[in-house]
Amino acid sequence: MKNTKTALYLKDWEYDLENISILKSLGQVILPSEFELDMKDFIFCPLCYTPITRNPLIKDVTSNGRQATFRHLPTYGDIKCPLSSLSSTGQKYANEEEAKQAIDQGDLVIIHGFLHASERNRNESENNEYHPDIEDIDGPLSSVPISRYKGETFELPSQITTVRGICRNFSKNYYKYYFMLSSNQPTMLCDLIHDIRDVTKENDTPQLY
């Protein structure tokens, strides 16, 4: 199974689909390094909310030298979750309304581009206000090929953002689907980020590191 890099911890909460809003609002995002043994029965997947475990439970490194991570439990194997599959798959949508709903709920972000100083200054002058910390502005409607049906595109609202805008509330954004206009499908942020230590040559395609 694919490992999970973060977990939601909430003391005394039990898996219950009707009370997921409680876990989402009160659950503490923790890393494997922040895990303590008395948390073991109260850590949950940040996407499907089923109970998960730390691997290994106590040590920081597995027997084959890998850093500790969180892992889904076979008991809940019938519940589909992008974080429990071995390979990462992009998200597709049945229709434009479904995609717009995902955007409204904060589960999908269409990135039209990254904010340059000239765009930031223009946005400030249009509003007659100075905002030195502007991180996101509304982009144009973009024709996005994220339909389940080949060749179909959706006209969806996009954002022009900054890397800092993505890093804000990073733990919440980490498992959110992002669509870059240079991509061919929405992909979770955790799968879009590349470890700079693995870079061996130049790449002409813009990527997040």
Image: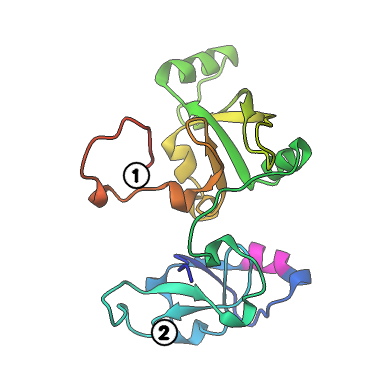
Is 21 part of what is drawn in magenta? yes
Crowding at mark 2 (Cα within 10 Å: few <14, some 14-19, many 20+): some
Secondary structure at badge 1 equals loop
Instruction: Report the residue at 74% width, 43% height from top.
Output: 94
Say if 88 sits above or below 100 in the image: below
From the top left corner, tell me how far across and down residue 151 is, in percent. 65, 31
The type of residue carrying mark 1 is Tyr
Q: Which residue corresponds to the image point at 41% horizontal and 84% vertical from the top-left? A: 57
Secondary element under disc 2, as helix, strand or loop, is loop
Q: Residue at x 65, y 63 (%)?
A: 24
- Say which residue label 1 marks: 209
Q: Report the magenta stretch's main SS.
A: helix
Q: Quadrant of residue 8?
A: bottom right
Residue at coordinates 78% horizontally, 38% vertically from top-left? 97
Nearest the eye: 11 or 70: 70
N-terminal of the pair, mark 2 or mark 1, is 2
Identify which amino acid the numbered label 2 is placed on: Leu
Which of these two is toward me, 185 or 191? 185
Q: Residue furthest left?
A: 200
Instruction: Decide: few, some or many residues near mark 1? Use Cα within 10 Å; few <14, some 14-19, many ≥20.
Output: few
Magenta stretch holds residue 187:
no
Residue 25 x/y as whole percent:
65, 62
Q: Residue 162: x, y in percent?
A: 45, 33
Which quadrant does the C terminus fall into?
top left
Left or right placement of residue 31 versus residue 197 in this view: right
Question: Magenta segment, which residues?
Answer: 20-26
Whole-percent x, y for residue 127 in the image: 60, 16
- The residue that disc 2 covers is 57
Count of labels in the image: 2
Q: CA distance from mark 2 to mark 1?
A: 29 Å
Q: Which mark is residue 121?
A: none
* Frontmost residue, 98 versus 44: 98
